[in-house]
Structures are given as C-alpha cells and as structure tokens.
Image (spheres, rainbow, N blue to C red):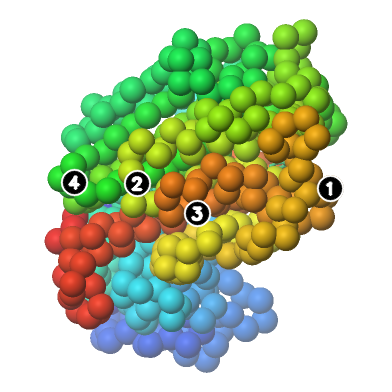
C-alpha cells in the first residue's frame, strides 16, 4: 500500500499533475476556497446538488483543460461521514485500471470533525476511514493465483487537504493498522493447504524480527507437557501437527501487566466426526480468522512500538474426521483440570481456546481478549456488521465498544447472565462442550469459555460474521485488527498516564507519548 499525506490548497490540488484526481463531494459540502476555473467547476457540480440527487454518484471528466489531471472524478460521499467516505473511496479505487500510477484525493470539501460521538480521538476515525479505503481499494490476493501480475492497482495515492498534516500522527496509526489488516487478510485468504498450523508458526517466527518482539512456537510434545488435553483432542484427527504460538511484545517495563490476545487458529474446520454439510465448507479455511487478526494486530503494534506489553497466544490445528479423531462422548482433561465431555466435535474452537486461556494466567495479565470465529449463532444474532463482544467488566466492555467506533470496526455487547450457562451440565464430566441447543448459541459458547477465565479480566470477540465476506467478493476483511490496535493504543495511553487520564487534553497528550 502506497499512501501519503499532503497539505495542499484546493486550487493547487485542482492543478496537480496526476493520472486521476478524486474530488470527494459530500451533499452538505463545505465549499472549498478556490479561485481557479477548476475549483469553479467543482462548485458548480456540488452546489445545486447535481451529485447525490437522482442517484448520480460520480461525475467524470477526461482531459479537461481546466485540470492538469488526466481524469477527474467528483465522487459523491453522502453526508460526508467517515463510513460513507470509506466505502465510496475504496469502491472507486477498485474500479481504476491497474496501469494507473498516481491518484490524488481531495478531502477539501469534508468537515474532518469527529463523525461519531463515540470516536474518542478527534481525527483518528478519519485517518482510519481514508487510509482504510486505500487499503481496501488497492488490496489484491495473489499468493495462489498464477495470473494476477499487472492486475493490482499499484498506484501511489496522495490524500490532500488544508489541514491534513495536523492529523499526521493519526495517519501513522492508520497506516500501521492497514498493514496489520493486510497481514490478517493474507493469512485468512490463503487456502488451508497453504496456511497450516506449521505455516502460521513460521509467519509468527518471521515477525519475531521486529523490535521488542519475541516469538516461541511449540509443537505436540511441548503442548502435551503442558497437559492441554482439550486442544490436543481437537488436533488428534489431523496429520498436520498442532502449533501453539506465543508472541511477546515488550514495549513497557516488565512490571507493567500485559494485555493478552488469544486467537482461534483452526486452519480448517470440517466439524470432525460431527461433520459439517458440504455447501460452503471451503469457507472453513477462515476458521483461523481470530489467529490472523492477532498476527495482524502484532504486526501493527511492532510497527508503532507503543509503550505497553502485549502477549499473543495462538492455538492452531485442523479439525478433521479420522480413525484417530476424537469422538462424540469422549471425555478429555483440560489444562485447567476441568474435564470436558465432547458432545459435538464441531464445537472445537472453545476446546482449543480454553487451554490457551488457562495458559494466559501465567502472564498475570491486565486483561485478556480472545478473538474467534466461534459460532454460526453469532452470525444469526448480529449479521455481518458488528462482531459479538462478551465481557462482564463494564470498563473493558466500554473501552472495546469505543475502540470499535473510533476505528470503524464495530462490535456489540452481548449478555453473559448466569442463566445462559445453565445447560452446560454433563453426567460424565465436569462440563460438556455444548448445551442448550441452538437458541443463544453464541452466548452458550461464551459461558463455556468464561469457566476458564476466573484469574483475570476477560473479553471475548465472536467474529464469525465479520472476519470474511461470502459470495462473489469472497475474501477476508482483516477485522478486528483496527479495533484491537486502537484498543491497545488507548490502553497504553491510560497505563502511561494513570492520574491524568480523566482530563481529555491530558489523555490526548498521553496517546502521543505512548507511541
Ligand atoms: N467455526 C465454526 C463457527 C462458524 C460457523 C463460523 C459458520 C462461521 C460460519 C465453529 O467451530 C462451529 O462449528 N460452531 C458450531 C457450534 C455448535 C456445534 C454448538 C456452530 O456454530 O454450528
Ligand atoms: Mn466447528
Ligand atoms: Zn470452528
């Protein structure tokens, strides 16, 4: 991704030499100051509501003598809010021919004020929206395609405006987040034969080259020694050896309790002996979306070097049916000592996560967040817009909600009432891995995980509906990397300035300092 910021007057932008000039045009445009004939044209286009009325989304102008650009595009962006700008701009970038070398985007008509009340850091939501649009608009999966050379838009994109430079710190964050999103998309999109637990371990190891990053990758022997019986039970039906990945980013003194991120890394979920139906089963290559998002978040954190400690834990294996596979009714002993009756081998995510959550205790974490494509039920509950967020602690829940709003990577808090866990009763083990039928299935799963988190503050993100999109544009989204990184930075700022965090000006200074 090649993106830069430039402070430029509207007239100068209109006269810039570039292959494509995109003029963002909200229907409630703050008309940019400009005296050139080009600026005049833009005002004519925007003022009478030519754009946005009657479904006109774009006005194109080629080789217009008033502009130096080869092609000018006035792009309607609705009311000019961050979300609409993101989707409209990424769509336009995707439609440009691959030969395009330079794209200039004028933000002059936008009011770059916080576009949601919850976006705590002014400007950061805009940085995420604009840079995120460039990432989404230029991304192309190529790893397992022989014929993609020359298809990706390799253009350099310049975002220009009057006051953009003032937001440059926010843009640096957004760029690192976009790089993290790209890492998450790449690994989630790779087919399961090219993204095995071994491959994920190698990627993590390679990331260990970043400053303040240490990586350890464990295999079956070490995991057996740790007595991770639930994790091992899922892995035992596959010829691919499991991996348990531990990444430690040390940006603060060891005395500071770390944030621990735990990512579900099922590189393919057939369901095991409780096998899934065939249609769309290919999409279960995305069942390591949680792991991919944790790798992506660590990439961004490694680039930004915030003053905070972060541990990433990734249990990774395949869930396969096999002569040696775990069977419905088998009872296994988890690392916590609790025995589990595996009534459905397709509820495997919670089995690998529970042992990683127990392992997390050794870091005496400030808090732990697990991220998992855990339940189809979460897709039924929230669709593809918001990830499910489960957290008994109000402060942590609010922080995660806010990180979602700021980054445009939304989540929604779900309940954890004790009554939802009532059906987790087994006659043959301490707990079963399923219970209560289909109703409220995402909450039952969270209640299962909760039984392994009594030592620390904990949140669970169910990303089954948000980690990828299906259909003609099938592909990973890179979510929730933006939410995770925004949250970790916000936490870093608070950990740096515990006394002054209440004043918003002090909090802002602390955000800067923490980087
Ligand atoms: N990886 C799936 C969840 C999933 C399904 C995510 C479809 C996205 C789309 C998970 O391992 C699973 O199979 N969950 C079961 C749980 C059930 C057996 C209690 C489910 O959701 O059906
Ligand atoms: Mn499953
Ligand atoms: Zn799964």
Q: Residue at x 72, y 9 (%)?
A: 324
Specify few, some or many for label 2: CA neighbours under 10 Å numbering under 14, 14-19, or 20 or more. many
Residue 340 appearing in the image = yes
For label 2, the residue is 365
Q: Quadrant of residue 350?
A: top right
Q: Earlier in the sequence, mark 1 or mark 2?
A: 2
Provide residue 27's location: percent of width, then percent of height.
51, 84
Task: Give yes or no for contact between labels 2 and 4 (Cβ–Cβ under 8 Å).
Answer: no
Closer to the observer: label 3 or label 2?
2
Q: Earlier in the sequence, mark 2 or mark 4?
A: 4
CA–CA distance between discs 3 and 2? 12 Å
Task: Tell which residue pokes out farthest to the bottom in this image.
Answer: 48
For label 3, the residue is 459
CA–CA distance between discs 4 and 1? 44 Å
Question: Which of the image's four quarters has the C terminus?
Answer: bottom left
Tell me the element at label 1: loop
For label 4, the residue is 255
Q: Residue at x 63, y 60 (%)?
A: 416
For label 1, the residue is 437
Specify few, some or many for label 4: CA neighbours under 10 Å numbering under 14, 14-19, or 20 or more. few
């Amino acid at each position: 991704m090649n993106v830069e910021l430039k402070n430029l007057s509207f007239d100068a932008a209109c006269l810039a030499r570039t292959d494509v000039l995109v003029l963002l045009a909200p229907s409630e445009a703050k008309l940019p100051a400009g005296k050139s004939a080009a600026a005049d044209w833009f005002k004519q286009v925007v003022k009478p509501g030519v754009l946005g009325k009657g479904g006109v989304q774009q006005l194109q102008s080629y080789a217009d003598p008033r502009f130096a650009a080869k092609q000018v595009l006035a792009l309607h962006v609705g009311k000019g809010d961050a979300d609409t700008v993101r989707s409209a701009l990424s769509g336009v970038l995707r439609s440009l021919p691959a030969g395009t070398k330079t794209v200039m985007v004028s933000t002059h008509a936008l009011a770059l004020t916080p576009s949601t009340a919850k976006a705590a850091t002014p400007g950061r939501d805009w940085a995420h929206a604009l840079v995120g649009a460039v990432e989404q608009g230029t991304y192309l999966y190529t790893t397992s395609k022989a014929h993609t050379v020359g298809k990706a838009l390799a253009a350099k994109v310049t975002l220009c405006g009057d006051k953009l430079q003032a937001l440059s710190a926010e843009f640096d964050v957004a760029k690192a987040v976009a790089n993290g999103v790209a890492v998450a998309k790449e690994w989630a999109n790779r087919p399961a034969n090219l993204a095995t637990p071994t491959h994920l371990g190698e990627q993590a190891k390679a990331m260990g080259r970043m400053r303040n990053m240490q990586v350890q990758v464990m295999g079956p022997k070490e995991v057996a020694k740790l007595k991770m019986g639930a994790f091992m039970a899922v892995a035992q039906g596959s010829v691919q050896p499991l991996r348990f990945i531990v990444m430690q980013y040390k940006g603060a003194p060891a005395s500071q309790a770390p944030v621990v991120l735990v990512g579900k890394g099922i590189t393919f979920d057939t369901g095991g002996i409780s096998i899934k139906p065939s249609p769309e089963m290919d999409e279960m290559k995305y069942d390591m979306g949680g792991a991919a998002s944790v790798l992506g978040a660590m990439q961004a954190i490694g680039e930004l070097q915030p003053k905070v400690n972060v541990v990433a834990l990734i249990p990774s294996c395949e869930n396969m049916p096999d002569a040696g596979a775990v069977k419905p009714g088998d009872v296994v002993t988890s690392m916590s000592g609790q025995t589990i009756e595996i009534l459905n081998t397709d509820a495997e995510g919670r089995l690998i996560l529970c042992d990683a959550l127990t392992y997390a205790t050794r870091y005496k974490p400030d808090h732990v967040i697990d991220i998992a494509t855990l339940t189809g039920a979460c897709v039924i509950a929230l669709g593809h817009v918001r990830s499910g967020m489960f957290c008994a602690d109000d402060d942590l829940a609010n922080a995660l909600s806010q990180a979602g709003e700021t980054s445009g990577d939304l989540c929604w808090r779900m309940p954890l009432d004790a009554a939802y866990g009532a059906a987790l009763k087994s006659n043959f083990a301490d707990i079963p891995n399923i219970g209560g039928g289909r109703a409220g299935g995402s909450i039952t799963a969270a209640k299962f995980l909760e039984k392994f988190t009594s030592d620390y503050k904990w949140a669970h993100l169910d990303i089954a509906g948000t980690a990828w999109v299906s259909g003609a544009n099938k592909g990973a989204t890179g979510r929730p990397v933006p939410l995770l990184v925004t949250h970790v930075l916000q936490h870093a700022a608070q950990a740096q300035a515990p006394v002054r965090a209440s004043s918003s000006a002090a909090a802002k200074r602390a955000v800067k300092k923490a980087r």
